[in-house]
Structure formats: C-alpha cells, structure tokens
Image (tube, helix red, strand yellow):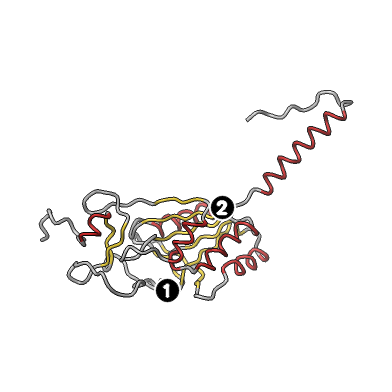
Amino acid sequence: MQRPIIPAKTGDDGALREWLGVAGMMHQLRVNALAKLHFYYSAMNAGKSTTLLQSSYNYNERGMDTLIFVPEVDDRYGVGKVTTRIGLRADAITVKDDFDIYRHVREDIATNPNIKCVLVDEAQFLSQQQVQQLCLITEELNRPVLAYGIRTDFQGEPFVGSKYLLALADELIEIKTICHCGRKAIMNLRTDETGGAVREGNQIEVGGNDLYVATCRRHFRLGEAVNSLVPVE
C-alpha cells in the first residue's frame, strides 16, 4: 500500500487540509467497514462443532468474549450444549423457534461491549427470520457471525436455515469430509439399525454416526453407507 504523502511545508494550508481530509475519510471507511456473516457448511461429521469451538477459543485467547448459540432441537448431549465427537464441549445459549437472536445479542453487547463475535452451531435448524437476524447483527451491531451447519437433509432437500444462509451470507466456506469411496462427501445418508438406507420419515431426526453417514452423491443415490467392495466382518 502506498503511504500518504504528508505536506512538508507547514505553511501549505491547502495541501495540509487536503491530506487531513483524505486521512479522515480513510479512517471513517475503516470505522464503517461492516462485519460479515460467514456460513461454514459440510456433510455430517466433518468437524463443524470442533471448528466452531476453536474459533471461539481464538477470540477468548486474545481477550475477547464470544456468544455461542445452538438450536433447542439439537439435544444429543443436553440442551444448550455444543459437544464435539473428539470430546470438546461448551455451554451455549438455546435458540427456540420464537427466539430473537439479534435482540439477545444487542442486549448482551450493551452490558458487555467486549463481545466481539457471535457463533451459531447447527444453523440449519434456524428459521428464515432468525437468519435475517444474523444479518442484522453484522449490519447494525458490527459483529462478525460464524454459522455452522449442513446444507441438506437425508432426502437431499435443503434445510430452511441453510437455504437462507446460502442466499444471504457474505462468505460461504466448505468444511470438507470424505465418502467411504474416497470422494468428497456432500450428502447425508440416514441409515437404519442394519445399515440400510432410510428414504422416508421426518426431516429432523437428531443423531450422529448411529443414524447418518456422509457420502458422495453417487453412493447417496445408491443408498450405500459402506463400500460394497470391502467385505464387512
């Protein structure tokens, strides 16, 4: 970046005023720079919650506070908990269907201005209105929002929250994982107790490795949760 040229002659008032005007404008642009809404998406069991907790820790390590939210529907490890497959966990604020995330964040920042980032786990379960509230947090409160979730359900249909995050987020970041065949996994195959594919049922059925397998599009279509070429013991 080219450094601004400061007028050498103190008597050159016109040049000095021009330089101060440019410097002031650049400062105002930096002040007015909006925070962004980031949507980190992936198939099941790709490490989204682990990435979320690492991001929150990075802020905390630098002396900044964060707010973590999780929808009430995700109660695998208890309501209001973000828990990872590798054992990391943290308390979170529970988001119910009628919960106003923007209002909650605004009130918390009013009492604690050191809150510098908002994180949302399982963001696919948010409503359209709640995704719009995340946008407001970045625009009106100037706080970055990091939302984590999966794009589609076990039938390949988009979740409401993910649909609007894909449409409205400033940044889309894919967290990659792999299918049993080695290809990138982008689908979420629901399985029964025998490992067979489940094609009918409610869109939301909370579970982990016991219910879902991340697969590539081909093996999702074939309904194969394991590699058919590898003998199953």
Task: State the separation of the CA atoms marked 2 and 1.
Answer: 26 Å
Which numbered disc covers residue 36?
2
In the image, 44 versus 114, the foreground residue is 44
Q: Position of residue 159 (x, y in %)?
A: 41, 65
| Amino acid bearing label 1 | Val
Side (left or right) of 20 relative to 155: right
User: Which residue occupies 41% across, 60% down?
Assistant: 49
Which numbered disc covers residue 73?
1
> Mark 2 touching mark 1, by CB under 8 A?
no
Q: Residues within 10 Å of mark 2 (few under 14, many from 20)?
A: some
Q: Position of residue 122 (x, y in %)?
A: 43, 64
Q: Position of residue 187 (x, y in %)?
A: 31, 58
Q: Position of residue 174 (x, y in %)?
A: 40, 51
- Seen in the picture, residue 5 relative to 159 is either above or below; the reply is above
User: Which residue occupies 71% across, 42% down?
Assistant: 27
Q: Quadrant of the C terminus?
A: bottom left
Farthest top residue? 9
- SS for tag 2? loop
Q: Residues within 10 Å of mark 1 (few under 14, many from 20)?
A: some
Side (left or right) of 197 relative to 154: left
- SS for tag 1? loop
Farthest right residue? 11
| Amino acid bearing label 2 | Lys
Q: Quadrant of the N terminus?
A: top right
Counting labels gives: 2
- Seen in the picture, residue 140 relative to 100 is either above or below; the reply is above
Question: Of marks 2 and 1, which one's residue comes earlier in the chain?
Answer: 2
Side (left or right) of 21 relative to 70: right
Dividing the picture into quadrants, the one containing residue 19 is top right
